[in-house]
């Protein structure tokens, strides 16, 4: 009997050795430990043994049963561990693969040039002010000494919304709005959008300007020249020559346009500077007394200068861009270069 039980144990061992999945092992369990299984036959035979032997054999059967159960549990454990390992292996990430490349956005060249200009002027003590793009005729023209019948209105190609309301054609109305609010001395720059009905290689219906002005006691034309020369040098290089050329704006007197030596031909004369060797970068002048009266400043007591420049124009000259429309097409091949 003992030998037969040992054989049974060995038989289980063999059966388990080839069992590769849980189903097979469950079958092995029923085959040996089930109610009609092989071990059950031994228990049945117990009754036929002499009474004296029964406890000993019974104990043997129990031991065998325990050892078979242990074997089966062990095997189940091995298989479930193996399974787990396989799953983990399948889920492994290959971290050596190069990641997906994505290009983060960056600032538009107009924004970049605007911040550069703003930095130059704030370093000289100018504060930043803003005004509305939908503007009253009064602030855009009237208060800037451009009455309704003034020929200078023709230069502006205005988008009118109603007779009194329009899209501002320049940032100069911010001069008026700021001086109405603040007492002199004031020195302000004002970046923003402006609108004109115009479209070609150097004009777009919407464009950007930076307005600037400095008003106080005894502000003179030499202050204008000094500030704008510093600006031109910082923007286009210390060696860039600057020229002040007489001009006309209804809201400044005297007025001057500021030119720099052509960045393309260095003054030789080329297509970009129309052979003149110079490029206009901004308009400027001494604030007209009529403007001071409009905002309630006393022209006998205060004086000041003002200037306005197109940001697109500055960017075109700085980077040698020959078509303003490139700034608004949003072609990433263009934008990526900045
Ligand atoms: N507003 C003028 C323009 O748009 C520029 C300018 C501003 C000229 C301030 C003089 C003083 O052309």
Image: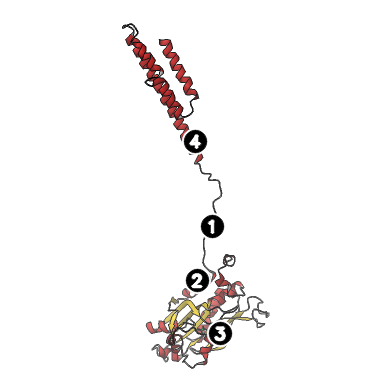
Q: Nearer the viewer, mark 1 or mark 4?
A: 4
- Circle 4 packing at 10 Å, graded few (<14), some (14-19), many (20+), is few
* Residue at mark 4 to residue at mark 2: CA–CA distance: 58 Å
CB atoms at circles 4 and 2 under 8 Å apart?
no
Q: Quadrant of the C terminus?
A: bottom right
User: In the rendered image, which residue does mark 2 sit on?
Assistant: 115
- Circle 2 packing at 10 Å, graded few (<14), some (14-19), many (20+), is few
Up-down relation of residue 80 to residue 64 (above or below): below
User: In the rendered image, which residue does mark 1 sit on?
Assistant: 102
Q: Earlier in the sequence, mark 3 or mark 2?
A: 2
**Element type at marker 1?**
loop
CB atoms at circles 1 and 4 under 8 Å apart?
no
Q: Nearer the viewer, mark 3 or mark 1?
A: 1
Up-down relation of residue 104 to residue 305 (above or below): above
Using the rendered view, name the quadrant where residue 77 is placed: top left
Q: Earlier in the sequence, mark 1 or mark 4?
A: 4
Up-down relation of residue 7 to residue 140 (above or below): above
Q: Position of residue 214 (x, y in %)?
A: 45, 82
* Residue at mark 1 to residue at mark 4: CA–CA distance: 34 Å
* Residue at mark 3 to residue at mark 1: CA–CA distance: 45 Å
């Amino acid at each position: 009997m003992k030998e037969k039980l040992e054989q049974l144990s060995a038989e289980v061992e063999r059966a388990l050795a080839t069992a590769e999945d849980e189903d097979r092992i469950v079958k092995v369990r029923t085959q040996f430990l089930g109610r009609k299984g092989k071990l059950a036959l031994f228990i049945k035979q117990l009754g036929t043994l002499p009474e004296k032997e029964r406890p000993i054999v019974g104990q043997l059967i129990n031991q065998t049963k325990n050892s078979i159960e242990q074997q089966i549990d062990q095997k189940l454990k091995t298989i479930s561990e193996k399974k787990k390992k396989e799953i983990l292996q399948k889920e492994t990430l290959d971290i050596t693969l190069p990641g997906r490349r994505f290009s983060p956005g960056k600032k538009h060249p107009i924004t970049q040039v605007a911040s550069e200009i703003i930095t130059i002027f704030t370093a000289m003590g100018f504060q930043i002010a803003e005004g509305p793009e939908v503007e009253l005729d009064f602030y855009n023209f009237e208060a800037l000494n451009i009455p309704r019948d003034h020929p200078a209105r023709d230069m502006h190609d205005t988008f009118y919304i109603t007779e009194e309301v329009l899209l501002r054609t320049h940032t100069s109305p911010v001069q008026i709005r700021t001086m109405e609010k603040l007492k002199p001395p004031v020195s302000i720059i004002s970046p923003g959008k402006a609108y004109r009905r115009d479209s070609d290689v150097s004009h777009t219906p919407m464009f950007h300007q930076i307005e600037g002005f400095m008003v106080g006691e005894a502000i003179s034309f030499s202050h204008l020249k000094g500030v704008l020369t510093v600006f031109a040098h910082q923007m286009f290089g210390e060696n860039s020559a600057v020229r002040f050329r007489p001009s006309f704006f209804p809201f400044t007197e005297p007025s001057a346009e500021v030119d720099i030596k052509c960045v393309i031909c260095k003054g030789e004369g080329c297509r970009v500077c129309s052979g003149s060797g110079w490029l206009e970068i901004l308009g400027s002048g001494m604030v007209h007394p009529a403007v001071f009266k409009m905002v309630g400043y006393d022209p006998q007591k205060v004086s000041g200068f003002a200037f306005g420049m197109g940001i697109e124009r500055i960017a075109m000259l700085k980077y040698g861009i020959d078509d303003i429309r490139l700034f608004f097409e949003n072609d990433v091949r263009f934008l990526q270069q900045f």
